Image: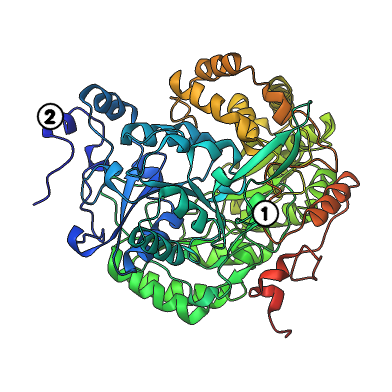
Amino acid sequence: MRKLALPDDVLLKVEKPGRYTGNEINSVMKSKDEVDIRFAFAFPDTYEVGMSNLGVQILYDMFNSFEGVWCERVYSPWIDLDKIMREKNIPLFACESQDPVKCFDFLGISLQYEMCYTNVLQILDLSGIPLYAKYRSEDDPIVIGGGSCAYNPEPLASFFDLFYIGEGEISYKELFETYREAKKAGLSRMEFLKKAANIDGIYAPAFYEPEYNEDGTLKAFGPVTEDVPATVRKVIVSDFKNAPYPKKPVIPYVQAVMDRMVLEIQRGCIRGCRFCQAGYIYRPLRERSLDEMKEMVRELIYNTGYDEISLNSLSSSDYEKLPELLDYLIGICNEKGINISLPSLRIDAFSLDVMNKIQDVKKSSLTFAPEAGSQRMRDVINKNLSEESILGGALEAFKGGWNKVKLYFMLGLPGETDEDVKEISHLCQKIAETYYEIPKEERNGKVAITASTSFFVPKPFTAFQWAPMNKEDEFLEKARMLKNEIRSEVNQRSMSYRYHDAEVSVLEGVFARGDRKLDKLIEAAYRNGALFDSWTDTFNSDAWKKAFEETGIDPYFYTARERSEDELFPWDFIDIGVTKKFLLKEWKKSQEAVTTMNCREGCSGCGARCFGGGICFAPES
């Protein structure tokens, strides 16, 4: 019987002790004597959030299919347990074996959003691993980061031994084999890291160095030794139809944020929205085969017991075999009482027809993301969504029985005017008016329109990576303006409005386009008490303000400053296929509100064809 890392008296004192006990259904247990590589896979947030991450589930399943490898899971301890672990000197441990993380060969950390960076330091600190890679000994785990934030690894570069750039299914097997060979040959930590740096998609920060201009911008960046590559190219799954996928995912004891079966139907996106990092870094679009997914659905239902299945992709309605897949799902799911969830739909007739097929008589709310209120701004961001199609889609939805619509927008987009902000309110008003075009006897109660706005954050590898970002007061003034405009509308009682935290958005912007000089800022904020920064209840504004004062770093250097066309970015050494030349072309087109066709309408020459696979190389029909 396993001995738990936390004694009973500690478990009784913490919220949701099931976060830390492990032993869930489908979790993998192996004998330590039968493995030669132990990998602790950490998610720097709560158990409930981490257990909802599909990427972690995919790699956990894949790693444990490798002979001689045992992958275990680690999550950030919540505030209550964090305090107790420090008081009682309890080291951070893995869920499966309950062994300390420090005794593993690798510590992998999933980097999904910038506001988890202080939690990265928490994981290292509680594990007893030196925060800075340069101070680690031969006995410390190799710390490797991956995920969407790894596409600009520089703000965290000092804390990691390696970064994995791209999709995890490709290079880990080679990395593990290289580690085995290095151990067998008695190589040092640094010798192994140098070998790892020559594996496709692997970046070892210790062998690269930035040089800065007097104004703080990057002057040069490159390797300090000749035997590592100057450019790190992302790795992707070209043969997506045969990519590994967990058919027996771990079932959490504590209800996860996304507590359901997840079926990834495709990876990548054809749309080219200019603000969307995922739409560029995961190019080209690759789809799973219909037959493969039918088999996966059957196995997921048998192995999980969930009563809901969600189709996962950046734009579900772009999956070419969606009608056929839905017909199959409706048949098998109705028989077993399983609900079907279809996020990431566009507001068009096809999507609404799809929703009508899967929704029961009691309609839940519809969620769409026009992103901008005015047609000009939708053209600026290349949303390729007209007001006519939005209103037409809303009318069809209302006729179909829906009366609640959630709409997501962004404030602070490049080139936005006050009138563009007010147009968000006007669009919501028009949607509400559309509802009342339906005869009263056919309406389903009162209409409810909820508008939510996030604040625009320019991300690396997007057309807007050159764009300036609003300051907190500018964001808040726009939110106030929109709130007042909604209050003045005729149907304002039918509309509600929410907006994101401006200070958190600016911090996200600092780290999104940050460089290696930010390591001291992250450490200072962590030492000041910053933790779980993406959680409203735990965000510590004072800790960050103090950290900026202590380090002398100006946040607006990274956010409010517009970049020149020839500026060298901290992430320019990474090759994602989509070229900087193409992104710059899109940036210029955005300033003229000129749109670009989607990938199925025609190739726009972004550069992603270089990877092969996907629709870039699909045979013409």
Element under disc 1: loop
Above or below: residue 195 compared with residue 485? below
Q: How many angstroms separate mark 1 from mark 2 (CA)? A: 53 Å
The local crowd at label 1, few if under 14, some if 14 to 19, many if 20 or more residues have their Cα within 10 Å, is some
Q: Nearer the viewer, residue 111 or 436?
A: 111
Residue 487 image-quadrant placement? top right
User: x, y percentage for residue 40?
Assistant: 33, 50
Residue beneath label 2, please?
9
* Residue 120 in view (yes/no): yes
User: x, y percentage for residue 464?
Assistant: 76, 44
The local crowd at label 2, few if under 14, some if 14 to 19, many if 20 or more residues have their Cα within 10 Å, is few
Residue at 50% in and 57% down: 196
User: Label 2 amino acid?
Assistant: Asp
Q: Nearer the viewer, residue 463 or 182?
A: 182
Q: Is residue 565 left or right of residue 401?
A: right
Q: Is residue 356 left or right of residue 615?
A: left
User: Label 1 amino acid?
Assistant: Ala
Residue at 50% in and 22% down: 525
* Residue 496 in view (yes/no): no
The numbered disc on residue 581 is none
Closest to the camera, between mark 1 and mark 2, is 1
User: x, y percentage for residue 414?
Assistant: 80, 38
Q: Nearer the viewer, residue 193 or 509?
A: 193
Residue at 85% in and 43% down: 566
Element under disc 2: helix
Residue beneath label 1, please?
230
Residue 559 image-quadrant placement? top right
